[in-house]
């Protein structure tokens, strides 16, 4: 089944001074999969210049962190599934390309189906240094290397 999808990415960063979140709804793509676990293909793209945390200065720092002039998007290319995609727990396997670095990732989550739509919600933790991203600092306090990432997506149900 082939369907265009839309979605959202929410990051939660932290430092000794507290934590904060930013949202990006500039998520698009297309996925091809069967109902059972197995092959999956397609691509999901995130426009890295479109973060919103409620703080314009922080958003500008996030865009600068990603060096969006050189690396305007992040992409996820799914390669497989663990679980069923018609409803319930599932882990999406794939390759994340971010800041010029490609690494395999697993995104555990849940699929639900309602009103003719299929929804995915998943969470993972990324280390900024794994992607050659320089950890920002403010007043000498460095941002934690680990960033929590929540992803959600929707597409017309098969």
Image (tube, grey):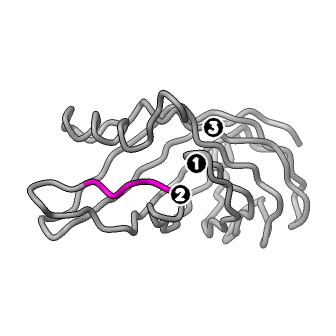
Q: Alpha-carbon distance for marks 1 and 2?
A: 6 Å
Q: Quick one: label 1 or label 2, which is nearer the N terminus?
A: 1
Q: Who is closer to the viewer here, 111 or 66?
A: 66
Q: Alpha-carbon distance for marks 2 and 3?
A: 17 Å
Question: Is 102 situated above or below 57?
Answer: below
Q: Alpha-carbon distance for marks 3 and 1?
A: 10 Å
Q: 10 Å neighbourhood of mark 1: few (<14), some, or many (≥20)?
A: many
Q: Quick one: label 3 or label 1, which is nearer the N terminus?
A: 3
Quadrant placement of the N terminus: top right
Residue 134 part of the magenta-drawn span = yes
Question: Is 129 situated above or below 96?
Answer: below
* Residue located farthest toward the top when viewing the structure as drawn: 69
Q: Which residue occupies 47% across, 57% down?
A: 150
Question: Is 91 situated above or below 121?
Answer: below
Numbered range of the magenta stretch: 132-136
Q: Are marks 1 and 2 in contact (CB under 8 Å)?
A: yes
Residue at the spot of label 3: 45
Residue 131 is tagged as: 2
Residue at the spot of label 1: 98
**Dot 1: what SS?**
strand
Residue 129, how many percent across, how many down? 46, 64
Residue 64 is tagged as: none
Would you say the magenta stretch is mainly helix, strand or loop?
A: loop
């Amino acid at each position: 089944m082939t369907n265009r999808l839309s979605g959202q990415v929410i990051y939660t960063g932290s430092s000794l001074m507290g934590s904060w979140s930013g949202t990006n709804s500039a998520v698009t793509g297309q996925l091809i999969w069967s109902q059972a676990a197995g092959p999956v293909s397609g691509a999901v793209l995130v426009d890295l210049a479109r973060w919103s945390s409620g703080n314009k200065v922080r958003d500008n720092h996030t865009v600068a962190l990603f060096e969006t002039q050189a690396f305007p998007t992040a992409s996820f290319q799914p390669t497989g599934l663990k679980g069923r995609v018609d409803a319930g727990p599932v882990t999406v396997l794939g390759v994340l390309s971010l800041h010029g670095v490609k690494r395999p990732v697993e995104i555990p989550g849940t699929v639900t189906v309602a009103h003719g739509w299929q929804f995915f919600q998943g969470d993972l933790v990324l280390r900024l240094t794994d992607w050659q991203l320089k950890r920002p600092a403010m007043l000498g306090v460095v941002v934690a290397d680990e960033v929590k990432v929540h992803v959600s997506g929707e597409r017309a149900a098969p």
